[in-house]
Image (cartoon, rainbow, N blue to C red):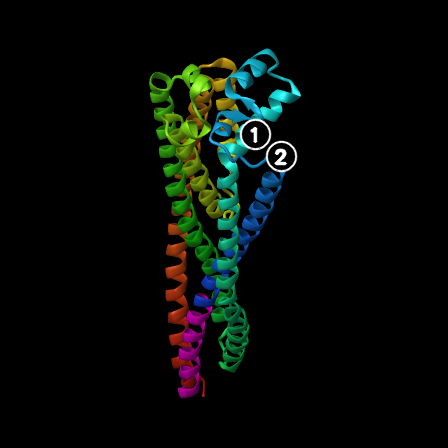
Amino acid sequence: MGRDLSMVRRLEKIDKEIGYCEIKLEKERRLRTQLEFLHVTAAALGRVIGSFEPRSGRATLESGRNLGGAALVAVCQRATLHPASAETERFRSEFRAEATLPLLIDERQSALREIADLESRLLTFQVFRAKLDGLMRDRKKALAALKGGKEPLMEMAHEFERVEQTWNTLTEDLMNIDEAIFYVSHSLDYVRSARNFILAARSEFSIESWLRSGYLVDLFKHSAVGRAKEMVVGADRNVKSAALELLCLEEVPLRTEALSAMLLPFLDELFDDLFIGLKLTRTLRFLDERTEAFMRWLKELEGRREAIFALQQEHEESRVRLFNRIGDERKRLSVAVPAQE
């Protein structure tokens, strides 16, 4: 009896350690998914940065009133006459570069730092894979060492392992989707703030006056339009964080219209408003569309979160019942052996 009781206790300890290792390895799998996403993001940012035409140095203050080598008023005149021309597209590209190139460079550096951090964190998980292999071998030996009547225990152990794995997955899913909901909610707040700044700019910012005597820095740094751009950047940053969390979940759809970066399309609409329409209508409509998309996305995520939580609770109950049955069976084995001898 003493030897079997010792083995029962050893099995309990082994199973607890196996559960801990499996939780860690599930976390590792998700971090590797995020690492792959960051590699793709950094590469895409590098391509976008490289797509901007090289810009000549701007050494004079007067150059801040030019775009692509032309005065702002001249850009407006040419773009209005030929909105689909190659020259207008060149002006639009220059406008994007003025507004985003420093931001994109910073974002790529941030992605590279995140990659380095994740790679460092992943190194700490290597020990758990080797430890799990050893624990599985130890459990097999411990089960083999038990005397007759162990088959029900082995069947329950396999069932518990299956339920435990699903429970671990759902528990991690809840953590990921909670983080994603947090980030999407913040993205929605940023887009709403951007919309409010554009509404303010419609009454406070004179496009005609800016075209005649303003500077690009006035637009991007010292106006309500510039604050709107900052809010769009904040929304994009939170969307990327949400995507990192949702990529770890297999059954949560990613809304492409919400996930796609906002800044470049926002700037394209802003360019048309400033240099062709002379009214901030297209920009406002774009922000309204994105606000609605974020609201739909957030509602879907909250609904999916409820479904995941319900599944996790079901598996939690099954997990507890199986754990108790395994404990009862181990006790039965520990006291049944003497009766057979």
Look at the image and tell me whether residue 244 can be seen: yes
Position of 116 relative to 255 (above/below): below
Residue nearest the viewer, comparing 215 with 7: 215
Specify few, some or many for label 2: CA neighbours under 10 Å numbering under 14, 14-19, or 20 or more.
Answer: few
Label 2 – label 1 distance at C-alpha: 7 Å
Position of 260 relative to 87 (above/below): below
The disc placed on residue 94 is 1
Can residue 8 be found in the magenta stretch? yes
Instruction: Check whether the beta carbons of the residues at disc 2 and disc 1 lie within 8 A of each other.
Output: yes
Can residue 336 be found in the magenta stretch? no
Q: Give the position of the N terminus as an image quadrant.
A: bottom left
Q: Give the position of the C terminus as an image quadrant.
A: bottom left
Q: Secondary structure at mark 2?
A: loop
The disc placed on residue 53 is 2
Residue nearest the viewer, comparing 96 with 133: 96
Q: Which residues are magenta?
A: 1-19
Q: Residue at x 54, y 53 (%)?
A: 35
In the image, 50: left or right of 265? right
Q: Secondary structure at mark 1?
A: helix
Q: Amino acid at mark 1?
A: Glu
Q: Main secondary structure of the magenta part?
A: helix
Farthest residue in the right direction? 86
Position of 94 relative to 159 (above/below): above
* Whole-percent x, y for residue 75 in the image: 55, 19
